[in-house]
Amino acid sequence: MKRLSLISTTLLGVLIMFAFTMTSYGQTVESTIDIPGTISYQGLLTSPNGGAIDDGTYNITVTIYADEKGEEALWQQTYPTLVAGGLFNIYLGTPEHPLPGPDAMNRPLWVGTQVAGSAELRPLTPLTSSPYALNVSDKAITARKLAEGAVTADKVDMNYVSEVRVDGKRVTGKGSVLNLESGKDISLNYDAVTGSVKIESAHTATGTHKGEDGASLQGLNDAWGGQGDQLDPGTHNLVLPAAGDWLGTSNNVIMEIKTWGTTAMRYQTSAAGVTPNVIGGNIANVVVATSVGSVIDGGGSGGFVFNFINGDYDALGGGDNNAIGTAANAYNYSTLGGGQGNSIQNNWATLAGGAVNTVSGAYGTVSGGQSNSVTTTHGTVGGGLINVVNANYGTIGGGDHNLVTALAGTIGGGEDHEVNDIYGTVGGGFANIIAAGAPYGTIAGGTMNTVNNQNGTIGGGNTNTVSGDFGTVSGGGTNTVTAPEGVVAGGTANNVSAAQGSIGGGTANTVTAAQGTIGGGSGNNVNLPQGTIGGGAGNNINGPLGTVGGGFNNHVNQQLGTIGGGQDNLINNMYGSVLGGQNNHINADYGSIGGGHDNIIHPMGVSGTIGGGQINMLDGDHATIGGGMGNNIMPLGLFATIGGGIGNMVDGDRATIGGGEANNIVGPSSFSTIGGGQANLIDVQHGTIAGGEGNNVMAGGMYGSIGGGQVNHVDVQHGTIGGGEANNVIAAGMHGTIGGGQANLVDVQHGTVGGGEVNNVIAGAFHGTIGGGQANLVDAQHGTVGGGEANAITAAPYGTIPGGDNLNVANSYAQTAVGFFNAPRGAVGIRPAPVALTDDPLFMVGNGDWAGGVPVRTNAFEVSYNGHSVIYDVNGSGGATVFPGRPAIKGATYVDNVIYGWADVPATAGGAGTVVVPNDDFGVATIVKGAAVGEYIVTLNVTDPVTGLPVTLLNASITATLVDDPVGSVTCGSITTTRIGTFGANSFKIQTFNLSGGSCLNDELPFMFKVTGRP
């Protein structure tokens, strides 16, 4: 079970009862909260590693204790509880299992928790206060339990009050009558039903009165409160008694609201029924009287410094000395947020703030800043200093001394920029210029950049110039684009002077041909169309569509040549390709060199390929050298391949050497292959050597193959050697195979040696096989020796020896021998008399031995062609008595002893105890006659096949069958058997019957039985 931890809990206990009394107009109403009588208990359960436990439903047991140690339990309950993310929530106390009463709960309490039957979590959690409480029982509160000030005058019956005082003066004593009288503006009404006195207003107030909570204000000239008094929206209301009542003036007199005697807000109307103007702030602020619906929220400092509006529906938020319109000109629907000295002189304009900013174009906007100006329709200045928009839809985001003079021009920010043609854009920076005659020009930023033609673009940088239409300089310094659609991405002193030329960066690179491209680097030149240089230094393209990726001093002098990089590489023919390296040369069309140094493709090497390495030479059409050093493909090596290595040579059509050293495919050895190794040689078509050293596929070995090893030879068609040393497939060994090993020989068709040493499949062994081992011999067709030592199959077709030692299969057909030193046909020797087999053995298990340095051959087990099997433990087939044991028996045992015994039993007459000899049997100790006719008592000899110890069968299945005698057939017969163990351990009875006179009688009949079971 997981060990759990309770990280935190929250308990809302039932501890205190809340009650309150509210008195109004002499009436008293008591109310108590409905107590739920439960405790909300929450917590977080974690596992020992600190993470939350798995989500699910757990049984959580909660116990309330009266002490911190958990020795006095007051209450306990178990709850099936859903836990999610480790969190749980339980309500303690149910109608069926309520919490203890107030008397038991009126003390400090602690809570303990058990989860899913685990130990209770400690320490215990103290129970804290709660919004609810249990009702307190009668007489539960005694005088000593009352807190100071708990009992007040309004809670005590007058009979218990010794005297009443008003303003410190005694009015009445204990038990005396207290008489209350009404006075000015106050009425007293006694309610006999409730026994209370209602004190309330007489509904008429004269003089000056301070209102209290809930008071209504009706028909009064002034309403006031003391210093520091506040109007609580929740308890104070200014009430107009009826619909249609209002606060204000009924003529053209301006209504004012003051604070501390100073005007704070004025409401004026130019005529009856029109939207009034609202003027806040200083008394000097002005909305021209003819204006309608305009607003000044505040601001102004008085005298000649004030905010001013002349127009309808304008809004001025505040600030000082701001104006919408002039005394002579009114402008409508404009907005000025604030600031100082700002001016709007057109309709629908917006000026958010700042100082000394001007908007004189309709729909113009200045968001802030200083001394900014918008003079045209829909112009915008976001902020900054002395920015000017003199064109419709022009925009300046901010900055200093920027100027837009053309339609929809844009300056984002920065200093001293100019946009002098339509839709021009300067993002920022310093002193960037979109010149007249450069519509749609763009400069994102940087310093002193210039666009002189349409749609030109400069991303940034310093002193860059675009004079070609649609030209682009992304950045850098002193870069120039003078041709249409030219591009310089960056760098310094780069120049594109041809249409659609492109330079990515670097320094002093030049594109003088159309659509030429230089990615970067230094001093690179593209002088013919569509040439490309990725980078590097001093590289040159002098052929159309040529490419140099990078490097130094590489030259492409023919069309569509490609050099990836490196140094001093040269392409002099069409479509050549050098990936890199140094001083690699291509002098044939379609030639390709991956890298390395001093590799050469000669003129006859059309479409030839050298992957890399050094001093490799190729002069064969479509030939390939992967790499290495000093490898050579000669002119006859069309489509030939050398993967790598040192000093390998191919002079055959489509021949291949994978690598290694000094390997050779000579003469017209077409389609031959050497994978690698050293000094291997192929001198025939379709020969293959995977590797190794000194291996040879000679002139007679067409389609021959050597996997590897050393000094192996194949000199016959389709011969194969997997590896090893000094193995040979020769002369008559067509399709012969040697997997490996040493000094093995195959000299017959389809012969196979898997491996081992000095194994031979020779002339008579057509399709013969030796898997491995040592000094094994197959000299019979389809013979097989799996392995072992000194095993031989001679003149025995289809003979098999899986392995072993000194086994022989000879002068037979399809024999199999296993074990060691077997006695093959012709040397059977002595057999036990009961077996007397006369046919040849099909399967033999040899168990001979060395005796005096001479092999003594004998068999332990034989299976003959007629299906008989013989086991020899003593006097085996070789006549030796090396291994003592029981006499030979027919039959077999299963490893798990599923079949324990069987027998073929003749009909036997005789009295009780007569021994019955079965015709054949297995696992039978004795069979004796019983007392009755046809009664046989069988006892099995059951032993453990591993330990050899006796075993008693507890359960067994016995199958008994009558034998139908062909001489005198049984007209009615049956047989029965008892359970195993009925007549002693491993014993049972069999009874045979025959029909005579219409009923079955006991009779002596031949039968067979089989016993299966387990101990």
Image (spheres, rainbow, N blue to C red):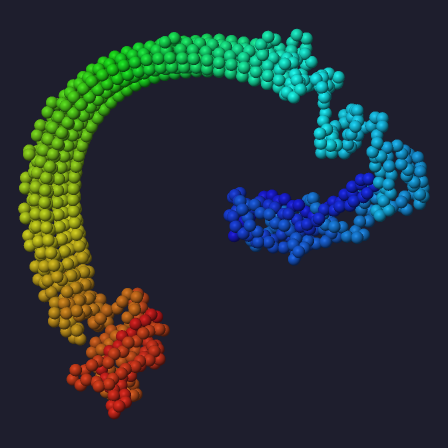
For this orientation, the residue located farthest to the bottom is 997
Seen at 8% across and 48% down, the residue is 733
Left or right placement of residue 578 versus residue 198 in this view? left
Could you tell me residue 423's position as x and y percent?
41, 15
Residue drawn at x 19%, y 60% as measured from the top left = 819
| Residue 955, placed above or below residue 288 | below
Instruction: Give the quadrant of residue 46.
Output: top right
Would residue 188 appear left or right of 909 to someone viewing this image?
Answer: right
Regarding residue 392, the answer to whether it shows in the image is yes
Residue 408 picture quarter: top left
Q: Is residue 664 visible?
A: no
User: What residue appears at the point 8 percent right and 50 percent down from the top-left corner?
Assistant: 749
Q: Residue 745: horizontal and vertical position, in percent?
A: 10, 48
Q: Is residue 158 left or right of residue 271?
A: right
Seen in the picture, residue 603 relative to 955 is either above or below; the reply is above
Residue 148 vs 466, above or below: the answer is below
Looking at the image, the residue that sits furthest to the front is 272
Q: How many numbered marks are there?
A: 0
Q: Position of residue 526 (x, y in %)?
A: 24, 15
- Residue 246, quarter of picture: top right
Q: Nearer the viewer, residue 719 or 87?
A: 87
For residue 366, side relative to residue 670 (left or right): right
Residue 487 in picture, x, y percent from top left: 32, 16
| x 62%, y 15%: residue | 291
